[in-house]
Amino acid sequence: MNRIFFWTTAAGVPISLIGALLNWDPTIMFAIYAITILALASYIGRATESLSIIAGPRIGGLLNVTFGNAVELTISIFALKAGYLTIVLASLTGAVISNLLLVAGLSFFIGGLKYKRQSFNIHDARHNMGLLMFSIVVSFAFPYIFSFQLTENETLALSIGIAIVMLLLYFSALFFRLVTHRGVYVVESEEGQEEEEPEWDKRRSIIILALAAIAVAFVSDQLVDTFESVAASFGWSEVFIGVIIVAIIGNSAENITAILMALKNKANISVEIAVGSTLQIAMFVTPLLVLLSLIFPAPLLLLFFKRGTYCHDFICISDHYDY
């Protein structure tokens, strides 16, 4: 698998550069960009994993926060810059659904085919699920409900306030988990295992991580430029591109890793990837995108559902707001 990713990266990055300079067909380049990002994401994941092993669990946790959803964040930033607000919101929604249903479900199913019983840290699961339920209600439901009585500027102010609260709460939860109560989250079944060896040393991991991040930024920028042409060619809506295409590309490396960990009887890591990645999206990536969007012409509002006219029992609520 690593050899496939190597040759895909070695061929995909130069072809992406040449295609962008020569303005090749956007539909073909869309496929090339997507495959190249998938390969680059694997290198980001492997470099981060090596640095996590070298630096220890606490620094490793911070690295996972920073780079766990790096591809998703990079694509979303360039999509915001291009004004594709619907695609950004749809990709965030798709990533949440994909992680909680597809990734977790496949990990449990495939791991269960090989092992009769798998275990994970219940304290870790409770911690993540409690924060996740809170963040989903506050970030997804509250802005939409209250926006019926608010103007667009007031809804933006509400979105910014929620984003700041989510970021503060997320980093506070990280401090609780990685510093003050880190002993609670040690998995007993893993305490007797041999110390894991990193794939690359510290210097090589940092170089690979930096190069992969730069390449992902360039290819993501070119990928966003093909959205309009691809949507016109295949008849895809912005919601479909966000929920399906961008969500799958952005979380591909984590998805594969979660399933492989389940096959190695490391269900705790699979749960951490599926639920922890969703938590990052809801409490870190989404609030960060809201704040970053303030530097672009069109700010991002925390409205994951389109507004229109809704009728029930002859009572209609109408609003003209829409992306």
Image (cartoon, helix red, strand yellow):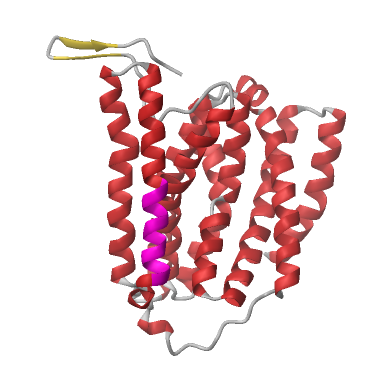
Q: Could you tell me which quadrant the N terminus lies in?
A: bottom right
Say if the magenta span includes residue 239. no
| Left or right, 240 with reference to 130 | right
Q: Residue at x 42, y 16 (%)?
A: 322
Which one is nearer the viewer's eye here, 288 or 100?
288
Say if the magenta span includes residue 175. yes
From this view, report whether residue 146 is shown above or below residue 265.
Answer: above
Using the rendered view, name the quadrant where residue 154 is placed. top left
Predominant SS along the magenta part: helix
Q: Residue at x 39, y 18 (%)?
A: 152
How far from the left and from the top, in percent, is residue 127? Answer: 31, 62
Which one is nearer the viewer's eye here, 53 or 41?
53
Q: Residue at x 70, y 43 (%)?
A: 217
From this view, report whether residue 242 is shown above or below residue 188.
Answer: above
Mark yes or no: residue 4 visible: no
How far from the left and from the top, in percent, is residue 123? Answer: 29, 69
How far from the left and from the top, in percent, is residue 305? Answer: 36, 26
Using the rendered view, name the quadrant where residue 10 is placed. bottom right
From this view, report whether residue 39 is shown above or below residue 121.
Answer: above
Q: Residue at x 53, y 29 (%)?
A: 294
Using the rendered view, name the quadrant where residue 56 is placed. bottom right
Total marks in image: 0
- Report the magenta residues as a range: 167-179
| Left or right, 16 with reference to 220 | right
How far from the left and from the top, in percent, is residue 303? Answer: 38, 28
From this view, report whether residue 157 is shown above or below residue 57.
Answer: above
Mark yes or no: residue 311 visible: yes
| Left or right, 314 with reference to 114 | left
Which one is nearer the viewer's eye here, 264 or 163?
163
